[in-house]
Image (tube, rainbow, N blue to C red):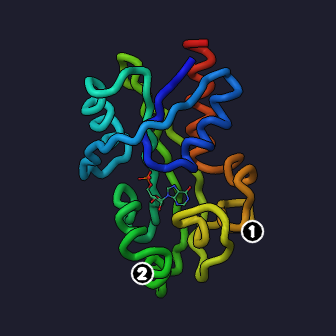
Amino acid sequence: MEIVFITSNKGKVEEAQKYLGNLGVRVVQKKFEYPEIQANELEKVVEFALNWLKNKIDKPFFIDDSGLFIEALNGFPGVYSAYVYKTLGNDGILKLMDEIEDRRAYFKSVIGYYDGKVHIFTGVVKGEIIFEKRGTMGFGFDPIFVPNGFKKTFAEMTTEEKNRISHRGKALRMFSKWLKENLI
Ligand code: IMP
């Protein structure tokens, strides 16, 4: 079975293939621009995008939207994570957090799958924003985030280590479990 993954991020495709490949699913990347509405929840952004895409793409297909939510900043950057990463970056976030003691934050990933109906799978990993960047692996906010129960940042972990506990890994596991029970 083939499932189209609409994304411009090759890393996300590799991660998805790792999980869904075990089920005999081939993940095919398709780059296709779609609107990301300014809603305050990733689920709403994903649902809107799926409904916008559904008549333009052969089904089945899925998308993934994720973000970093910092408690002391009322969830910022959240749904604006991609834009904030491009503009402020990790140094900008550390500066914003300079005087802030409450370092709690979480990553959230929402996968939206469309097969004639909308199906949503989410994953969350809780942790803390540290005071200085550490590590060179991964991407995005990985160097400033330490997941609860660990000492290393995501950027100090191998992809396998990160995937085992990450928001995206959790959402992909839910998705592949659902596919196994419903399709294959
Ligand atoms: P999007 O899902 O591609 O829109 O990602 C939103 C932004 O959140 C990305 O540009 C990254 O900066 C950040 N982000 C999402 N997932 C991760 C992750 O696993 N590690 C670090 N940053 C992430």
Which corner quadrant of the image does residue 54 belong to?
top left
Q: Which residue position holds label 1?
A: 151
Q: In the rendering, which numbered label is found on residue 101?
A: none
Disc 2 crowd rating (10 Å Cα; few below 14, some 14-19, many 20+) is few
**Is residue 1 depicted above or below 164 in this figure?**
above
Q: Is residue 128 left or right of residue 51?
A: right
* Element carrying mark 1: loop
Residue at the spot 50% in from the left edge and 39% down from the top edge: 122
Q: Is residue 167 left or right of residue 39?
A: right
Residue at the spot 55% in from the left edge and 46% down from the top edge: 12
Q: x%, y% of residue 14?
A: 61, 43
Disc 1 crowd rating (10 Å Cα; few below 14, some 14-19, many 20+) is few
Residue at the spot 47% in from the left edge and 35% down from the top edge: 5
Total marks shown come to 2
**Is residue 9 depicted above or below 25 in this figure?**
below
Q: Given the image, on which type of amino acid does mark 1 rest?
A: Lys
Q: x%, y% of residue 52?
A: 25, 33
Which sits earlier in the primary sequence, circle 1 or circle 2? Answer: 2
Q: Given the image, on which type of amino acid does mark 2 rest?
A: Leu
Q: x%, y% of residue 81?
A: 40, 61
The N terminus lies in which quarter of the figure?
A: top right
Which corner quadrant of the image does residue 53 belong to?
top left
Q: In the rendering, which numbered label is found on residue 96?
A: 2
Q: x%, y% of residue 182?
A: 55, 13
* Alpha carbon separation for disc pair 1 and 2: 23 Å
Q: Is residue 52 left or right of residue 166?
A: left
Q: Is residue 11 left or right of residue 116?
A: right
**Is residue 131 depicted above or below 20 in this figure?**
below
Residue at the spot 62% in from the left edge and 18% down from the top edge: 180
